[in-house]
Image (cartoon, rainbow, N blue to C red):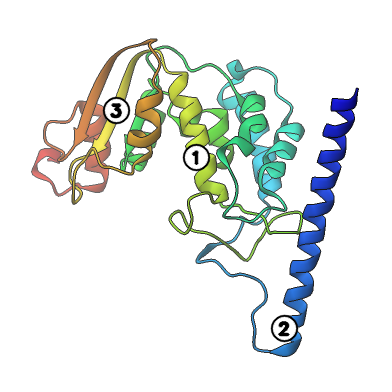
Amino acid sequence: MVSLISLHLSYKSRLRHDATMCGLVLLGLIGLSLANSEVDVPKKWKGKGSTTNLQQIMMGRCFDYLEIVNPSAGKKDCVKIWEEFLKAFSGKDPCNVRKEDYEQFLKLTDHDIPVNQSIFWSRTKDLIIKYTDVTQKYMPLERTLIGYLVDGLNWCGKSCSQGLDFESCPQWNDCENNAMRSFWRAASKNYAAKAHGMVTVMLNGSTNGNAFRNGSIFREIELENLDKKVTSVRLWIIDSIDGLDMPLQLLQCVENSDNPVCK
């Protein structure tokens, strides 16, 4: 009983400490703005702010996915999913959101990946999405419930203030633990760990530098989290239209119709 009481008191003390710190920060900012009217109190980031109507978009995507896109994902609580997503970063410094903060969200949205359908990419996202939508042979992260909910969206919170920051958010490389970067790293780790059977990897061989580049999520997160259930890896390095299998070649030809291979 004593340990539980101590833990409870410690937690309450931490909450009081956080509230006090936020209050001191706000008082400091107010004092600073009064001393110099030209000071811009809110911290502005280089990236776009949270997507307008983010909650409504995510809720709509959730119902769409579970009812139409992939009913085999099972029954999920879309309201609870949104609440846990928001809780992960709301009221926090946008550069101090950990991967672990999304743990409960990931649990609520989790579902199986069909055998042999895991596909990883690096700088080939557009082609991957088109290819998987046409062939229906693979389920990339962006076509799981976790990725489907937020793909193409922006989000972050504000220190000492609940809710979303619609004005600006950190860009990917502005800080290590920003809200979106931590999310995709956590989601990628979860996705890689669920892969089984043959996995496919599509890398871009036509960009400057190494196709298997340092710093990519595939190399840093996904590759090292593949489980023993993975039996083989098929690697595609996309360098030119010539030599691609037919579905990939046709997709590339849509945007490169002047290429001799496409005639």
Counting from the top left corner in percent of width and height, residue 87 is at 72, 42
The amino acid beneath tag 1 is Trp
Q: Between disc 2 and disc 1, whose residue precedes?
A: 2
Q: Name the residue under label 2.
A: 33
| Image quadrant in which the N terminus is located | top right
Secondary element at image label 1: helix
39 vs 206, left or right, is: right
Crowd rating for badge 2 (residues with CA inside 10 Å; few <14, some 14–19, many 20+): some
Residue displayed at 69% across by 55% down: 164
Which numbered dot is residue 201?
A: 3
Q: Quadrant of residue 201?
A: top left
Vertical relation: 50 (above or below) 212: below
Q: Name the residue under label 1.
A: 184
Q: Between disc 3 and disc 2, whose residue precedes?
A: 2
Q: Quadrant of residue 30?
A: bottom right
> Closer to the camera, 158 or 138?
158
Secondary element at image label 2: helix
Vertical relation: 181 (above or below) 170: above
59 vs 130, left or right, is: right
Q: Confirm or deny contact between disc 3 and disc 2 (CB under 8 A).
A: no
Counting from the top left corner in percent of width and height, residue 4 is at 86, 27
The amino acid beneath tag 2 is Ser
The amino acid beneath tag 3 is Val
194 vs 106, left or right, is: left
Q: For the residues marked 3 and 2, what is the alpha-carbon distance in whole angstroms?
A: 52 Å
Counting from the top left corner in percent of width and height, residue 84 is at 71, 37
Q: For the residues marked 3 and 1, what is the alpha-carbon distance in whole angstroms?
A: 18 Å
Q: Between disc 3 and disc 1, whose residue precedes?
A: 1
Secondary element at image label 3: strand
